[in-house]
Image (tube, helix red, strand yellow):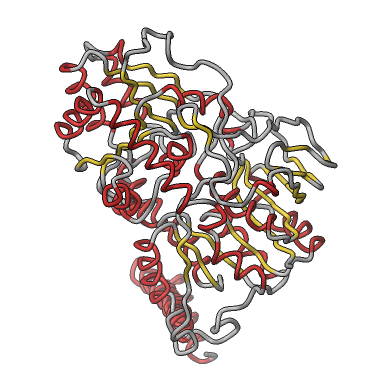
Amino acid sequence: MSRIFIAGMSPLPFENDRKVYGTGIRTWQFIAPLLKSGHEVCVCSYAIPSAYPQDFCSIYKKNFTYSDCDLKNGDSENSEDDRYAGAAGMGGKGTPMIDPGGEGKDRENATYSFEYNILKKEDFENIELLSKIFIEFNPDCIVGCTFYPSYVASKLLDYKKIPFWADLFGHVMAEAQARAYVDESDRCLFHYWNSEYNIISSADIFSCVSSRQKYALVGELGAAGRLNRHTSGYDFAEVIPCGIPENSFSRTGNAIRGKDGVGDKDFVVLWTGGYNTWTDVDTLFKGLVYAMERSPEIKFVSTGGEIPEQDLKTYPHFLSMIDGSSYKDRFIMRGWVPGEDVPDYYFEADLGINIDKAIYEVKLGSKNRIMDWFRAGLCVMSSNVCELTDIIEKEEIGYTFKPYDYKELGEKLIYLAGHRDEVRKTAIAGSEYAASNFSFGKTTAGLQRWAKNPSFSPDSGKRKELASEREDAVRNLERITLEQKKMIEERDRRISELEGIVKKGFIFRIYNYFRIAGRKIFR
C-alpha cells in the first residue's frame, strides 16, 4: 500500500458546518476509497472561508478516525473547535438505500484513520509550512483534489519529486469565461490560465469530471507540449464523474411541510446549494411563475445562496425578481442552512431542480447536487446541458428540458405536479441507477489502480521541446526588450546633449562638445 499526500478542499461533507461545497464532496470522494483500500493518507485542505467562522484558525489533526456510521476526532494540535457530526445514512422517501456501492454489510463498522489538516488561506498557500507536513509524512505520491489544491500541490514537487495525480474538477478556463462574463472583465483569465499551466505541465496523470472535459484537457496538454514523442499512446486522463458515498442520509426532523404556507398536498420544487455564475435564474424564475399561474399547488423552496468567493450577483438578482413578483409568497427562500439539516429538505420535497446556462463550463462539467438528490431518492429535473443530464434523459431516470426554454420548464412542472405516482417511480429509478453506477468506489477505480503503484508519466524529467521553445521565446523577447530599452536611453541622452548645444550659452555648449568627444574617444 502507498503513503498518499492529498491536497483538497474543506469542509468535507460530514463536517457539521454551515455550507458544503462540491469541492469538499469531491475531496471526500477521493479520500474514502483510498482509505478503504488500506493506503496511509495525509490530507491538507483549504478551509473555504464562507463555510467557517471569521475567527477560524488552522487546525492540525493527527489520527482522524472515520467509520461508516460515525466520525471521531483523534489527537490534534492547535485545535480550537471540534465540530464534526456523525455521517448520515440515506433513505429516499423513507425507503433506505443500504450500501449503494455494493461494499457489503461486513464493512459497515470498519474504521479508517488519516491525518487531517484544515488550513486557512495564508497557511494553505505557505509552501514552506505545507512542505514541512509533506516531508514529515514522506509520501509515495501526491493527489490534488480539484483545481486550486492541485495548483498548490504542484509546488511541493520542488521538495520531493514523486508521482503527481491532479484532479481538474471541471474545465477551469470555461469557468474563467463564466466568471469574466459576470464580472464584465477579462482580467481573471490570465490568473486562471497561469495556474492551469503550472498543473498541466507538471502532473503525471489527471482526472476529469466528464469525457467531454477529458478531451478539452487533451487540447490543453497539446498546447503545453505534453503530447510529445515520449507520451505517444499514454492515456493522460481518467474520467471520475461526480459520485455518491456508500453511507446514506438520515432524516432528523421536519423542514418544509407545515411551514411558510407549505401544505402536505403542495408540490414542492427544491433547489439546494449555491447560485453560481452559470445558474440561469432568469429562466428558472420565468418557468416557475409560468407554472404557478396555472397550478396553485406548486411551491418553490430554496436552500443555499450566493458564493462569496466566486459570485455575489446571481443570487441577489434572483431575489430581486422574486420580490417584485405577485407570487413571491410561494418562493420560500431559506438561504444557507446547516449541512446536517439539508437531507430533511430532500425527504420532504417532490422534485429537485437544476438549471444552467448552455455555456462551456456546464457542457464540460457535471452536477454534485443531482447526485445528492439521487442518493436521497428525490426525483431530478434539469436543463439538459452536461454529460450527466444526457445520461438522465437517455436512461429515463429523471426529467430534462431545453436550456433557456422557460415554457417547456413550466409545462413539465405542471405535468409532474399532476402525475406524482410517475414522479415517485422515476425517483426510485434514479436512485437505483446512481447506486449502481456512481458510487465512490466505482467512480474512482482508476485512481485506486494507480495508487497501488504510483508512476511517473513517460515524459517526466524529459525536455519538452514545445515548452522549452516557448520559454526560449520569452527569454528572447526579454532580451530584445532590454536592448530596445538601452537604445531608447541612448537616444534620449543624445537628444539631451544636442539640446544643450543649441539652447544653452557658449560655455555650456563647449562643455557638451567635450563630453560628446570624450565619449567617442573612450568608447
Residue at 54% across / 87% down in the picture? 463
Q: Nearer the viewer, residue 310 or 207?
A: 207
Quadrant occupied by the N terminus: bottom right
The relative height of residue 158 versus residue 480 in the rendered view (above or below) is above
The answer to whether residue 77 is left or right of residue 513 is right
The relative height of residue 484 versus residue 15 in the rendered view (above or below) is below
Question: Residue 185: horizontal and vertical position, in percent?
Answer: 33, 46
Residue at 26% across / 30% down in the picture? 284
Question: Residue 2: horizontal and vertical position, in percent?
Answer: 73, 67
Q: Nearer the viewer, residue 77 or 188?
A: 77
Question: Residue 465: horizontal and vertical position, in percent?
Answer: 46, 86
The answer to whether residue 291 is left or right of residue 111 is left
Residue at 68% across / 42% down in the picture? 68
The answer to whether residue 433 is left or right of residue 402 is right
Q: Is residue 164 visible?
A: yes
The answer to whether residue 202 is left or right of residue 5 is left
Question: Residue 404: horizontal and vertical position, in percent?
Answer: 19, 39
**Residue 328 image-quadrant placement:** top left
Q: Nearer the viewer, residue 321 or 403?
A: 403
Count the marks: 0
Q: Is residue 513 visible?
A: no
